[in-house]
Image (cartoon, grey):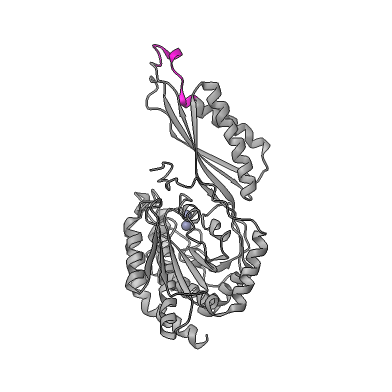
């Protein structure tokens, strides 16, 4: 490590206790998507205390913010998430950090703070931005922030996610639409005068049946999932209102848009058949993630400088006490090029600026995803070691992007190649408020 990187590592070390405290407090808050007031405020206050300015808040996106430090170019961003999940709290009861976002948000924020301290001390030019991104779990926050121009003007952006292994990622995921369909019918006594009723629930069911037939005639990689969010209140009342929530996933934006249009035809057919009125809302439109090889290589090189988290026997025993294998990944895996089947709203950022993501081991192998066992491991000493590795690796890579013009140029070149002249289309309507769950406030 050269002397600048040693200094940044020193700042990380000094900030470690404070960052661990923040991660534990956000875990306690366990606030669901779009309800993260306290978590967002805690991270904002930490940033302000360390010399960042809150540059932007978003009237249509609660709990989102942009914090900035320094001025001039380049401009490097860090993505912070802090939302919890339902039924992932202690023993699976109540909200909890079943995806480890208490660590995620904190790691990104303290990476940016450590980097800013070095910039200030050494007079290094450039700007550091932290993006407070609510509601990742509902795939909403960054979709709406991107629509409102939050990520415009960035030269590059870094993110991480806690996991069961340690590696830089140059992989991808699926594109996705989140859509809600409401049907409005006419109520009636279900036994007395059903002929006067027009059932909204019938419309939901016909739509779902039509979509289930559609499955045979879409490419095999396509995934369509739905949940009935409102299907009436009692069997003896013809339901005048019903709604269903769909996720449509595919390999890229073009494929998802094409399949969503066909799902929409099923909804129109259902409304026609049942003489109900149908209303569709596009809650989120997620892109497939673009990789960036130069950036992934820079992240990997810094990860190897920092070294993987060093877990102890006690860490393993703690995981075993939860009924897990207790195998905590101790090495650094090769850069991942995996194409996952899931989606993340950070993918939208990758179409606006070069983005790379790091994974750092914070919990035991075999831990189920979106689970209370992640919440319970997410405040343990092992997770705090992962948090420290993530913050330091991100800070060092941010430093490289600010000071190594050759790296930034290569990163930008790759970005231009992969976006191939396409301009980002947010798809979600311009003035639409970010939804809480499947409802627009
Ligand atoms: Zn997550
Ligand atoms: Zn998640």
Q: Is residue 270 above or below residue 161?
A: above
**Image vertical order of residue 168 relative to residue 179, above or below:** below
Instruction: Determine whether, in the image, residue 58 is placed left or right of residue 286.
Output: left
Q: From the viewer's perspective, is residue 196 above or below residue 397?
A: above
Q: Is residue 65 visible?
A: yes
Q: Quadrant of the C terminus?
A: top left
Q: Is residue 373 left or right of residue 303?
A: left
Q: Which residues are magenta?
A: 190-202
Q: Quadrant of residue 44?
A: bottom left
- Viewer can see residue 368: no
- Residue 220: quadrant of the picture: top right
Lateral position of residue 252 relative to residue 118, left or right: right
Q: Quadrant of residue 312?
A: bottom left
Determine if the magenta segment contains residue 199: yes
Q: Is residue 17 magenta?
A: no
**Residue 196 percent location from the top left of the image:** 43, 14
Q: Residue at x 54, y 59 (%)?
A: 349
In this view, the residue farthest toward the top is 192
Query: Which residue is pictured at 50% across the width and 74% down the height?
Result: 393
Q: Nearer the viewer, residue 107 or 398?
A: 398
Could you say where residue 132 lies in the image, as x and y percent from the top left? 41, 61
């Amino acid at each position: 490590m050269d002397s600048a990187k040693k200094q940044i590592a020193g700042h990380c070390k000094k900030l470690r206790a404070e960052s661990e405290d923040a991660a534990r407090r956000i875990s306690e808050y366990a606030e669901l998507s779009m309800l993260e007031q306290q978590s967002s405020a805690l991270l904002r206050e930490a940033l302000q205390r360390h010399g960042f300015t809150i540059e932007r808040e978003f009237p249509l996106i609660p709990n989102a913010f942009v914090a900035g430090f320094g001025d001039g170019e380049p401009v490097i961003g860090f993505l912070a998430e802090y939302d919890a999940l339902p039924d992932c709290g202690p023993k699976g009861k109540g909200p909890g950090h079943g995806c480890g976002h208490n660590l995620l948000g904190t790691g990104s924020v303290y990476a940016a703070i450590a980097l800013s301290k070095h910039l200030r001390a050494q007079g290094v030019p450039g700007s550091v931005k932290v993006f407070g991104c609510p509601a990742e779990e509902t795939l909403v926050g960054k979709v709406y922030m991107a629509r409102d121009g939050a990520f415009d003007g960035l030269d590059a952006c870094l993110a991480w996610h806690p996991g069961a292994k340690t590696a830089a990622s140059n992989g991808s995921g699926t594109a996705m639409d989140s859509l809600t369909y409401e049907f409005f019918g006419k109520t009636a006594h279900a036994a007395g005068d059903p002929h006067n009723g027009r059932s909204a629930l019938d419309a939901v069911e016909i739509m779902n049946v039509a979509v289930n037939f559609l499955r045979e005639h879409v490419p095999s990689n396509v995934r369509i999932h739905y949940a009935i969010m409102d299907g009436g209140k009692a069997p003896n009342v013809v339901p005048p209102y019903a709604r269903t929530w769909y996720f449509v996933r595919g390999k890229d934006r073009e494929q998802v848009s094409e399949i969503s249009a066909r799902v929409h035809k099923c909804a129109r057919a259902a409304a026609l058949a049942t003489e109900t009125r149908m209303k569709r809302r596009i809650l989120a439109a997620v892109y497939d993630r673009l990789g960036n090889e130069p950036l992934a290589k820079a992240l990997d090189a810094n990860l190897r400088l920092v070294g993987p988290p060093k877990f102890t026997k006690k860490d393993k025993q703690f995981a075993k006490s939860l009924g897990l294998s207790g195998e905590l990944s101790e090495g650094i895996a090769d850069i991942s090029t995996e194409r996952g089947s899931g989606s993340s709203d950070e993918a939208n950022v990758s179409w606006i600026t070069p983005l790379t993501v790091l994974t750092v081991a914070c919990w035991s192998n075999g831990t189920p995803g979106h689970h209370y066992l992640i919440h319970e491991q997410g405040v343990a000493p092992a997770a705090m070691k992962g948090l420290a590795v993530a913050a330091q690796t991100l800070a060092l890579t941010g430093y490289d992007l600010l000071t190594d013009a050759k790296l930034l140029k290569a990163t930008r070149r790759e970005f231009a190649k992969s976006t191939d002249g396409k301009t980002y289309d947010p798809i979600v309507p311009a003035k639409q408020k970010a939804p809480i769950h499947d409802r627009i406030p």
